[in-house]
Each structure stands twice: as structure tokens, then as C-alpha cells.
Image (spheres, rainbow, N blue to C red):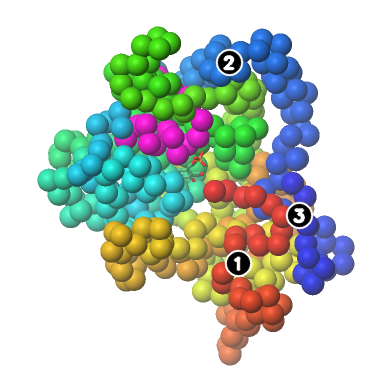
Amino acid sequence: MTATIPESLAPEAGNTPIPFVDLKAQMRSIRAEIDAAIAGVLDSCQFTLGPEVEAFEQEFAAYSQRPFGVAVNTGTSALHLALLAAGVGPGDEVITVPFTFVATASAIDYTGARPVFVDIDPATLTMDPRALEAAITPRTRAILPVHLYGLMADMEAIGEIARRHDLVVIEDAAQAHGAELHGRRAGSFGHMACFSFDPGKNLGACGEGGMVVTGDADLARRVRLLRDWGAPQKYHHEIKGYNFRMEAIQGAVLRAKLRHLPAWTEARARVAARYDELLAGTSIRAQAAPAGYRSVHHVYAVRTAAREAWQHALTRQGVASGIHYPKPIHLLPAFRELGGQRGQFPHAEAAAQTVLSLPMYAELTDAQVQRVGEAVRALATASRQPGHAAPRPAAAVARGGWSGAPAGAGLGQAGAA
Ligand SMILES: Cc1ncc(COP(=O)(O)O)c(C=O)c1O
């Protein structure tokens, strides 16, 4: 989508806006394939599940190095059903991280179980396995690590702890299609893994979509039953289920897009590597991928204590940015019943206060990446000048407060969830 910038924040002369995510650029590059995929579904009039969805289940499960895939209507439903299939319910505890999109904790909540948080590692921004063991209680039923920004959590260490305590592991892989740890893909470590195909994801539908992948035929069967009213055959409801089926149009679109995903992932890696180069030598920290990890760069976030000023300065130059996420879940009003306290998860809280996501998508040109990188580099250099104090942007104050503005505010672009 092309950014729409309010006049007061118009980009400086000659700088065309760089959106945070450009779904139109992707669509232009594959439009004929998408049209054909949708036309095939319209011709068949098989609108829900059906052969396109089945083929996509097989192809995406294979891509994630798993034998079984069950396609659903959203990533949130994938998490919800994976937890139910694992037997999670009222009275249980599920351990996850507070620095994630709210859906991770909401899915736990839907089952009646209680989300229990452990802090993140400050470098990787994913679950710190060293904090995990202390959070395990007799009520713990499952661990739900999140592969944040496209970087996998330390699944080897988490898996080892889970085996020792006989716990189910469900990967929240909503942001990590094709990410790897020592050559094994996101989705291939846990008992189950859950993907999102919302439009802003690395593999995005023309609408909503999700999938549970697993190596366990029985878990796949249970998720399949739950997504379609608990009925293996029409009107023969074995258990109480849901209408969480994937639409055939989304299955057909996602099959077409999956063929491009390896090239898009390579392009994202090139953008990330170029950002790394342009920001080298500054004090800027980005998410660290340890040796053996292959991130798929869903989000490229830098960290700065002067986030509001940086975001404002970038906006003035026509560069959109986002914040993923401005509040950790334990401090969200929606989850106040969990009794979360400020200071409880210092690394998650510090990340929430400092992360700033830069434009990231496969179609970014070298010139655009250069412009973003140089703009951020200049901000980092200016922030280090003695006596420099990050100004509170006047325009933002006039609008009634900057820190409350949503990610990418005013730039007319839906970004990563
Ligand atoms: C980490 C994480 N988990 C879960 C979800 C939920 O996926 P969906 O939006 O497809 O329901 C998302 C994305 O929205 C996400 O980023």
C-alpha cells in the first residue's frame, strides 16, 4: 500500500514515501497467478476446504518439514485448537513470553488455562530458557515459545526442558515461515506449531488464514475434528467443535504465493544484511541471531531510547516505521487479572519501550533500503552528540500525545500484527 502522509508531516523534497509494508508491490508482481487461483475456485464453487486447501496443507507442511498440516481460518484459531488438541483446559498453566502479539496469550485464555510468562533474552528477544524451569509448576501443561520477528526461539534448550518435565511444546510460528535452527525449520521442533497467513505475514493470504503443523497423526486428527464442528462426517458430531475452516480462495492464493516464498525470504535477508551494514559502527542494536539460526526477517527492529523522536524524524523524511509491541502482555489492561507488575519482566519491558521496526518487505529497492539505513544511521549519530537531548516532537504533542499513537501512525499502512 502506498503511504498517505498528513501534510504537517510531508516528506522532504524529492523523498517519495517508503511504506512499512507494500502489499500492492507484491500483488503487482504476481497478479496473474492470483487471478488464476481465485478464478479456479470460482469455477469450482467449492468455497470452504476442498482440494485447494488440502493441497496447500500438504505443501506447507512439507515446507515446514512436517507430515501433517491442518489449515484453519486464522493463526489465532491455530493456536487455540492446538492447545485444545493437547488437552489444555481450565486449571492448567501454559508458559509463554510477555513480549509477543496479544493473540499468543488470548489463545491460552480461550481454553480456560492461565498464561504464565517468562522473560525474554535481551539479545534475541525470544524466550529465555534459563528463566523457564523456575516457572514450571505441577499445573504446567504446555510451553508456547514465540519465534519473534522471524527468529526462532531456542527450541533445542526448550525441548530438552520440556522432555524432562513431560510437557507439550507448541511453537507460535506465526512470524517464522521457513525460519531455521541448525537446518531444522520452524514447525519441526514442537509437538505442534501454529502459523498465521494474515496479509502482512511473510506468507499472507488475501484475507485471513492459519495452520497447525505436526508430526503426530493423532494430534492432526484432533485439530481437524475441532476446526469443523467436531464432525468427521457431516452431522456426526463426535466432540464439540468450531467453524474454523480455511476458505478455498485463501488455500488457492496461498499455494500460488508459497512458490515465491523462498525468493521473498532471500530478498528479506538481503534487506536485513544491508541494514546491518548501514548501521554497523553505530550504537544501534538489532535482534541478534546466534550462530546456527536463520531468521526470515518478518520484522527488522532497532532499539533506541529516543524512539518517539526517531519515529517522528523518519516520518518527516517519508519513512514509515512500526512498534512491535509497545506494551508487554503482563502490563496490558486486558490481562490485568493475571496481576502483572511493572518490573516483573525487565527485558520484555525494556524491549517494549525501545523497539522500532523499519520498513521490511521483499520488494524494497536498494535505493530505498539505503535511504532508510542512512536516515537511521544519522539519527544514531546525532543521538550520541554530547548534550543531545531527544526532542519531543511538537507536532505530536499538538495532536495530543505521541507515545499513545499507534505503530506507523498516519502512514496509512497496516503492518505486522
Ligand atoms: C506472534 C503471533 N501470534 C499469533 C498471531 C495471530 O495470527 P492471526 O492474526 O492470523 O490470528 C500473530 C499475528 O497476527 C502473531 O504475530
Nearest the viewer among 24 and 238 is 238
x, y percent for residue 40: 70, 14
Residue visible at 29% across and 55% down in the picture: 117
What's under tag 3, amino acid-wise?
Ala
> Would residue 75 be counted in the magenta stretch?
yes
Looking at the rendered structure, the secondary structure element under dot 3 is loop
Task: Report whether residue 21 is seen.
Answer: yes
* Mark earlier in primary sequence (2, 1): 2
Q: Which residue does the image show at 69% across and 52% down from the upper left?
A: 413
Q: Amino acid at mark 1?
A: Ala
Q: Residue furthest left?
A: 138
Mark number, residue 3: 3
Residue under the image location 74 percent in, 34 percent down: 27
Name the residue beneath numbered marker 2.
52
Q: Spatial distance from mark 2 to mark 3, Cα to Cα? A: 34 Å
Residue 177 visible in image: no
Residue in the foreground of this view, choosing between 132 and 416: 416
Give the residue at mark 1: 405
Location of residue 30 with respect to 95 vertically, above or below: above
Q: From the viewer's perspective, tell me whether residue 72 is left or right of residue 400.
A: left
- Residue 312 is situated, as x and y percent measured from the top left of the image, at 67, 71
Mark 1 / mark 3, whichever is N-terminal? 3
* Magenta stretch in the rendered image: 68-83
Residue 176 located within the stretch drawn in magenta: no
Q: Is residue 53 left or right of residue 321?
A: left
**Which percent across, then down, holds residue 327?**
45, 63
